[in-house]
Amino acid sequence: MDPRGTKRGAEKTEVAEPRNKLPRPAPSLPTDPALYSGPFPFYRRPSELGCFSLDAQRQYHGDARALRYYSPPPTNGPGPNFDLRDGYPDRYQPRDEEVQERLDHLLCWLLEHRGRLEGGPGWLAEAIVTWRGHLTKLLTTPYERQEGWQLAASRFQGTLYLSEVETPNARAQRLARPPLLRELMYMGYKFEQYMCADPSGEVNTNVAFCSVLRSRLGSHPLLFSGEVDCTDPQAPSTQPPTCYVELKTSKEMHSPGQWRSFYRHKLLKWWAQSFLPGVPNVVAGFRNPDGFVSSLKTFPTMKMFEYVRNDRDGWNPSVCMNFCAAFLSFAQSTVVQDDPRLVHLFSWEPGGPVTVSVHQDAPYAFLPIWYVEAMTQDLPSPPKTPSPK
Ligand code: GDP
Ligand code: MG
């Protein structure tokens, strides 16, 4: 027995009482790389739980109909000569970026599969659910000097959901996007079409194939989804995600200084995006000023760090992953109340720490009523096996 006859909580209340009267410093999380340079944290080999597709009308389908096949030009031939501007703007149907989809398509998949997730019935209640792209932004935060982010977080039935909110800056930039940048975005999609022998003469960015993955970072179980460009039918393993290929375009480089800058900035983003889902290769097409791709280079995701390992101004995968783990711990300990209408908004701008504000309902609440209501219904119970007489 406790000789003082007090439970731990009761004793704490006495001591804590005067302290509660002091102004509590708002919690925040620093992002300085130097704070996160420990050993690489545990990261579970990502496994694919399933997939879904979005069609030309952005309608959800619980299958792989939008998955494309990697079919690069023959290596013995003359080399590529892709005109990335071909079809612009007349054969371009860009997705309506005013539509805020938040986690909806992923939640649609999750609703359908919640009853048969691996990891056991309690697994989801301990997990973090988000898009791969949101995790990518977390990974690169310690090195990012240009663009901030906001992540909305809600806890529901134990699970922590993270959904990005477009910052006022990002919105202003999107609405004022220069015509040349619009064309560059098209060119990236056009490259995918050339590399996938996609016969549709149209670039429609409503179409997407998304892989749903399970992993764990440190003590944080993760369920996230990411858009996958294509699968390589010739890959050494045809098992997803190791058969997947990420396609990128980049400016042709001519000087060692240009390559160095590419390794420091672009390769960091490419690494973060593909490492998370376990996509083993990124195939880059280098475009000249006229918008033609005449050379390709494959960057194995696990070798990207080698390009900056000896660079004082390079990036370090451990820093990225340790910061992400620290943010997830920060979010898990900040979002205590289980309430789908309550949002903790995590905000970050370069040069500062991650800060938090609290909101109820619109405009920040993001878990849709259809999801909350369906999840609140009892799961269909498994068929009862007749007990032996
Ligand atoms: P990425 O890693 O940034 O490409 O994003 P994800 O692979 O995590 O994609 C998540 C979902 O967001 C998919 O349905 C994508 O089609 C969609 N998506 C991808 N990029 C963007 C974007 O720039 N804006 C918006 N609103 N959605 C996007
Ligand atoms: Mg791509």
Image: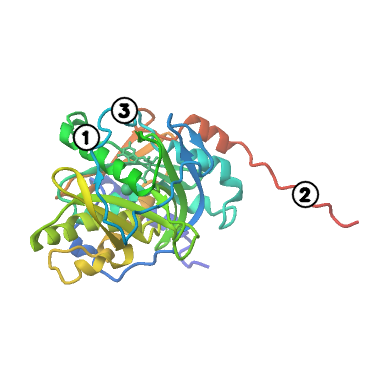
Q: Does the closest atom of ligand 1 sit within 8 Å of the Cβ of label 3?
A: no
Mark 2 against mark 3, which lies toward the viewer? 3
At numbered mark 3, what does the secondary structure look like: helix, strand or loop? Answer: loop
At numbered mark 2, what does the secondary structure look like: helix, strand or loop? Answer: loop
Label number found at residue 384: 2
Q: Does the closest atom of ligand 1 sit within 8 Å of the Cβ of label 2?
A: no
Mark 2 against mark 1, which lies toward the viewer? 1
Residue 226 location, x and y as percent?
40, 48
Distance Cα–Cα, label 1 vs label 3: 15 Å
Q: Amino acid at mark 1?
A: Arg
* Residue 339 visible in the snapshot: no
Of callouts 2 and 1, the N-terminal one: 1
How many discs appear? 3
Name the residue nearer the viewer: 317 or 284.
Answer: 284
* Looking at the image, residue 115 lies above or below residue 305: above
Q: Which residue, given by chain and number where applicable, does mark 1 sit on?
A: 182
Distance Cα–Cα, label 2 vs label 3: 48 Å
Name the residue nearer the viewer: 33 or 354.
Answer: 33
Q: Residue at x 91, y 56 (%)?
A: 389
Residue 111 location, x and y as percent?
55, 40
Mark 1 against mark 3, which lies toward the viewer? 1
Distance Cα–Cα, label 2 vs label 1: 57 Å
Label number found at residue 98: 3
Residue farthest to the front, as pictured: 77
Q: Amino acid at mark 3?
A: Glu
